[in-house]
Amino acid sequence: MQVRTLEQLLKEDTLRGKRVFIRADMNVPRDAEGNVADDHRLRESMPAVKMALEGGAAVMVCSHLGRPKEGALTEEDSLIKVAEHFGRMLGMPIRFEKDWLNGVDIQPGEVVVLENCRGNVGEKKNDPELVAKMAALCDIYVNDAFGTAHRAQATTDGLAREAEVAVAGPLLAKEIHALKKAVAEAKHPLTAVVGGSKVSTKLTILKNLAPKVDTLIVGGGIANTFLLAQGHKIGKSLAEPDLIDECKAVMKIMEEKGGHLPLPVDVVVAHHIGYDAGFRICDLDDIEDDEMILDIGPKTSKLLEPYIKEAKTIIWNGPLGVFEMDNFKEGTRNLAKDIADATADGAFSIVGGGDTIAAAKVFEVADKVSYISTGGGAFLEFLEGKTLPAIAALQERTK
């Protein structure tokens, strides 16, 4: 995944006087009044802007926000409040450009935030006419939005191919480096943790990772389906019986290569999901027909611990239980702590996916892992082994 970068252009002193178009990810959570509720993505977007300014460029920042209807942006869809927040973070005046497709008057040293790009007709379909209009606005295109790297849209794919110069921004470059380090260039033992409610949503990931990893840990409803595949009774737990054969195929891959796929030996069960749910810890053969598995038990946490702590590379996507509730959080909390400890001992750990990042924050290990991916769908598609269109476009330009 070799690509040219904005940092290289800065070192070459080729940014001076150039119009730089940065495709950032400013798709941030907002409160009821439309104000920024969490500016993490804005902080991640700042280095690219500062780098371009340092190089003497005129900087245009483009992003999507939500899923507006093309050609019919509403006030709620507008990036204006996000732009104002970003300007305060940068500590400099910035301009907001609502109608920007027909030209942006901008000078070196200035920053202009462009209105929500998904309001432009043809953005999602990667329309060539739209791409040509945007390419005319800039001398250099920078993709710094890994969260949209799996989308072949006008601002992520088309512009990367059409612009005079196309490079990766510092955030995208970091993501590419981290993902290479986690899979293609991983140090072994390599352990992957894949949790979640349904095997069907992670089946491609499991099939892609199984031949590559030394240990594959599954959790949540995914683990329940694997337990069914082993012949265990799981009460009324969430599972997908029609995917038992798929689970057996993954288990066979791990067995034939001498890998490990450790499944729960004890679990936390309850009659319903809720903060008020009475729960108990039991071995697998003690689950009642009217109970559901909502977390792994302490024996299982102990069983998984060495697979995490002895790993040199760890990929974590998905919790092991309903960690949002105190009565079902211990399995995921123990996992998070073990990953943090392994990282402190020299392992490289990468965390991705909304629920997983939330768990890392809840259990206070977000700053104790090696890397947290900014991309949800893009991270998952990478783990599935898919080509990410936005990165592929930059790779082709690098060649």
Image: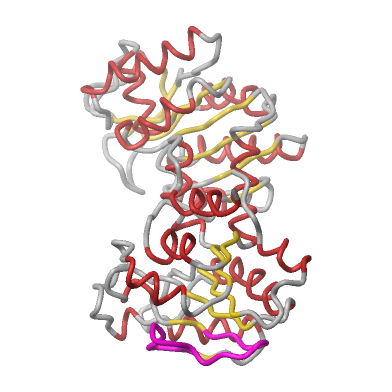
Residue 115 image-quadrant placement: bottom left
Q: How is the image coloured?
A: secondary structure
Compare residues 353 and 181 and report the one nearer the observer: 181
Q: Does the magenta-highlighted stretch encompass residue 109?
A: yes
Seen at 42% across and 75% down, the residue is 30
Q: Does the magenta-highlighted stretch encompass residue 288?
A: no
Seen at 38% across and 65% down, the residue is 154
Estimate the x, y position of residue 260 in percent, counting from the top left: 54, 15
- Residue 243 horizontal side relative to residue 30, left or right: left
Compare residues 39 and 130 and report the one nearer the observer: 130
From what the image shows, is residue 3 above or below residue 183?
below
Compare residues 232 and 32 and report the one nearer the observer: 32
Estimate the x, y position of residue 222 in percent, counting from the top left: 36, 30
Main secondary structure along the magenta-highlighted residues: loop
Compare residues 345 and 384 and report the one nearer the observer: 384
From what the image shows, is residue 167 above or below residue 101?
above
Estimate the x, y position of residue 253 in percent, counting from the top left: 45, 13
Q: How many discs appear?
A: 0
Residue 251 image-quadrant placement: top left
Which residue range is magenta in the image? 96-112
From what the image shows, is residue 111 above or below residue 396?
below
Estimate the x, y position of residue 89 in percent, counting from the top left: 62, 81
The N terminus, quarter of image = top right
Seen at 65% across and 38% down, the residue is 181
